[in-house]
Image: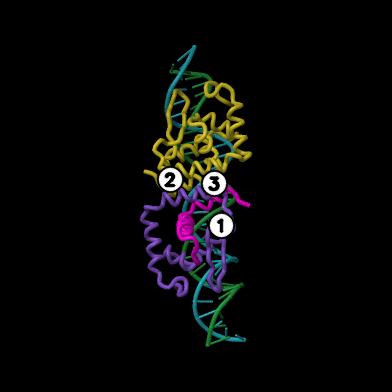
Chain colours: A purple, B yellow, C cyan, D green
DNA sequence: TGTATATATACGATATGGCGTATATAATCG
DNA sequence: CGATTATATACGCCATATCGTATATATACA
């Protein structure tokens, strides 16, 4: 079940907020797309995704060797509204533009993943 | 100016969230009302209020020896929406009911303060 | 079965944040 | 000014979270 404290702990980390904004906007992304978009290391992103999955924030789907993450379909409405407000607040930021820029610049995703 | 990281750091603490919800609902409260409502110590509440004031989340008004806190009037819209969603998520919680219960049970506030 | 790719986890080090207690500041009033 | 009430800050302690690096797991494919 969903815990308020855990939810806000999640939001207190910038990396996790960037991941959440991307997933809110793009719908579903694989791990390699996410750490490419954020220009950071794979273990770092995996750890943060794991935290959010255990917190009930994210849903996961495996397809071959790729793992796709998305927002959890049964997220409480109030939590979803918090995230929508976060997306709104982030929309015009330079950091978000850079993240989406790298995501869109990534060739053949996820078929030929970054390394 | 308003910092996103600082804002979410604020929300990661339960005491601060309880204070924010009370201020969102009640509009303006003095320090003694707040630490009575939360049934906790005065220094603890003062420190958290100070953190939120410096973060640009709260406005302050002094009246004699009392200090009244309220939500900052120029809070960014997206941040206000986050807080509205938090209020919604908290509305039916037992903790919130207890906080408001203690606040309303407090006699002659703020004229004759607790202790 | 062996290798390669994608993802997850373990571990030690470091940094940060919250707490309780004590004390300092600020304002009122006699 | 001295005392009282209300609020703010200082300090030391402890718990937790994040990071980088290394390694483990899982799947696909030759």
Residue drawn 61% across and 35% down? Answer: B97
Q: Is B114 placed above or below D11 here?
A: above
Cα separation, mark 3 vs mark 2, equals 14 Å
Q: Position of residue B110 (x, y in %)?
A: 52, 24
> To which residue does mark 1 refer?
A72
Q: Chain of mark 3?
A: A
Q: Give the SS element for disc 2.
A: helix
The mark found on residue A78 in the picture is 3
Confirm whether circles 1 and 3 share one chain: yes
Q: Mark 3 near mark 2, Cβ–Cβ under 8 Å?
A: no
Q: Give the SS element for disc 3.
A: helix
Circle 1 Cα neighbour tier, 10 Å, few/some/many (<14 / 14–19 / ≥20): some
Residue drawn 50% across and 39% down? Answer: B48
Q: Position of residue C2 (x, y in %)?
A: 57, 86
Q: Give the SS element for disc 1.
A: loop
Magenta-span inclusion, residue A53? no
Q: Is A107 placed above or below A16 here?
A: below
> To which residue does mark 2 refer?
B78
Q: C3 and D4: which one is in front?
A: C3
> What span is colored magenta in the figure?
A1-30
Q: Mark 1 near mark 3, Cβ–Cβ under 8 Å?
A: no
Residue A51 in sight from this viewpoint: no
Circle 2 Cα neighbour tier, 10 Å, few/some/many (<14 / 14–19 / ≥20): some
Magenta-span inclusion, residue A12? yes
Q: Chain of mark 2?
A: B
Q: A94 and B43: which one is in front?
A: A94
């Amino acid at each position: 079940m969903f815990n308020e404290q855990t939810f806000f702990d999640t939001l207190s980390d910038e990396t996790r907020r960037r991941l959440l904004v991307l997933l809110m906007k793009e719908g579903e992304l694989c791990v390699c797309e996410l750490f490419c978009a954020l220009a950071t290391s794979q273990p770092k992103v995996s750890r943060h995704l794991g935290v959010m999955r255990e917190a009930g924030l994210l849903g996961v789907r495996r397809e071959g060797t790729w793992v796709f993450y998305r927002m959890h379909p049964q997220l409480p409405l109030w939590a979803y509204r918090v995230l929508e407000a976060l997306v709104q607040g982030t929309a015009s930021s330079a950091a978000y533009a850079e993240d989406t820029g790298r995501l869109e610049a990534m060739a053949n995703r996820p078929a030929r993943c970054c390394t």
